[in-house]
Amino acid sequence: METDSPRSPEAEIGHRVEDLWEVAQPQLSPSEKLNSCFEDIPVAAFPRNHPSQVIEIPSDASLSDTVETLSKNKILSAPIRNVDAPEDATWIDKYIGIVEFAGIAMWLLHQSDASGNGTAGSAVGSPVANLASRLGSFTFRRTSSGRVETTTDSESDEAASVGGSFFETLTSSEFYKNTKVGDISGSFRWAPFLALQTSDTFLTMLLLLSKYRMKSLPVVDMGGNQIENIITQSCVVHMLAECVGLPWFESWGTKKLSELGLPLMKPYKLVKVNEDQPVLKAFQLMREKGVGGVPVIDTNGTKAIGNISIRDVQYLLSAPKIYKQYRTISAKDFLTAVRHHLQEQHEASPLLHDVITCKRDDVIKEIILKLDSTKIHRIYVVDDKGDTEGVITLRDIISKLVHEPRHYFGDFFDGVVPLPTNSTV
């Protein structure tokens, strides 16, 4: 009937899963049935981006140009295309990695800090060393009152100010403008070019995006020379949102978070930053703990007043002038300055929203719809008093949809990515 027609390409995938669900072996558990359904659907069936929407970064692009491209296209990462590869090169020779927005910023800060401490491989007088000598290397210390402050090994006002002057100096340096993205591929926080083939399955894709922590996956044809599609965690959660109402989805989507073992992290392990701590502390914690975002907690230490995501580091590079009035930038200052900047530029952003929260008794379907409608990557779990006690990410949700069969990947990862400690490969 016409009313049963899929309302979108993503919903069409949901109907395909429904057909497979109905004929799955009755002795299988619901979890095994979902695995079986997703194993029978090839990645080629996932709704494709228009070819012009697949953004590539040439390996001879500067860090400055790369940041501008990612920012303008509102994407977090992009494949690096090797400009020295011949025109008829296959994808395996054509692409040398994935550049992440956060990776660029973290790499720059790491290089500056390392040079300031004399531990980087740069010679004295190099752009990195000169930049570090002007800025000083910064560390974090807690005062007797408990407040965390930023300190440096230089006594100059400019070096002590990890504010607008820091990032203006960084982004105006010749090092930043002239270093090519291809020169640092494969180094600090750069992702491998792990591509899916169109014949791989949805189960493979879902496992890579959850258990194996990949944030985006290029899709290629064997022997082809271009990227056919890029699938992200956000794309998958949007697909799930389009499946609401289908019996297979409702049997899973109506489960409470607590029934699914969410949130995964215990309250005392939640990575967070206080509102008066330096914003660089937030990004440092993300790097050290391997998380994609942290809540900004009020002075009472219980309620989240905002969220800083790893992608928000772009505002330290693309709009450094907005912090010029701050001698130092606290997490709260950062949120205030960026929100003001976005409003002036009439730009939509999750940073303009209040903190999105949920409770343990909410069902997973409600969480998926909230994340998809607000285009955010995490939602915070609060108790009855509104105190923050956990977080649920896109990856967490996908990880509860499927499980990895023993020896499923075989030699798939050889030489590509480090395996999780609990891998069954």
Image: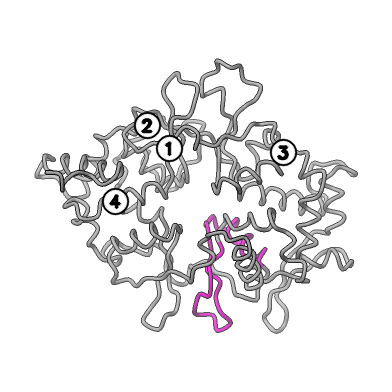
Check the picture and name the quadrant holding the N terminus: top left
Q: Is residue 41 magenta?
A: no
Gap between marks 2 and 4 measured at Cα: 32 Å
Check the picture and name the quadrant holding the C terminus: top left
Gap between marks 3 and 2 measured at Cα: 38 Å
**Vertical relation: 202 (above or below) 292:** above
Label 3 Cα neighbours within 10 Å, binned few <14 / some 14-19 / many ≥20: many
Say which of marks 2 and 1 sits in front: 1
Picture coordinates of residue 379 (x, y %)? Answer: 42, 65
Upstream in sequence: badge 3 or badge 4 = 3
Disc 3 designates what residue? 62
Q: In screen coordinates, is 382 left or right of 192?
A: left
Gap between marks 2 and 1 measured at Cα: 30 Å
The stretch of residues the image draws in magenta is 279-308
Disc 1 designates what residue? 49
Say which of marks 3 and 4 sits in front: 4
- What is the three-letter code of the residue carrying label 2? Gly
Gap between marks 3 and 1 measured at Cα: 26 Å
Which SS class for mark 4? Answer: loop
Disc 2 designates what residue? 410
Gap between marks 3 and 4 measured at Cα: 39 Å
Residue 242: which numbered mark, if any? 4
User: Are the residues at dot 3 and dot 2 in contact (C-beta closer than 8 Å)?
Assistant: no
Picture coordinates of residue 263 (x, y %)? Answer: 37, 64
- What is the three-letter code of the residue carrying label 3? Ser
Upstream in sequence: badge 4 or badge 1 = 1
Q: Residue lying furthest left in this view?
A: 26
Q: In screen coordinates, is 326 left or right of 59?
A: right
Label 1 Cα neighbours within 10 Å, binned few <14 / some 14-19 / many ≥20: few
Say which of marks 2 and 4 sits in front: 4
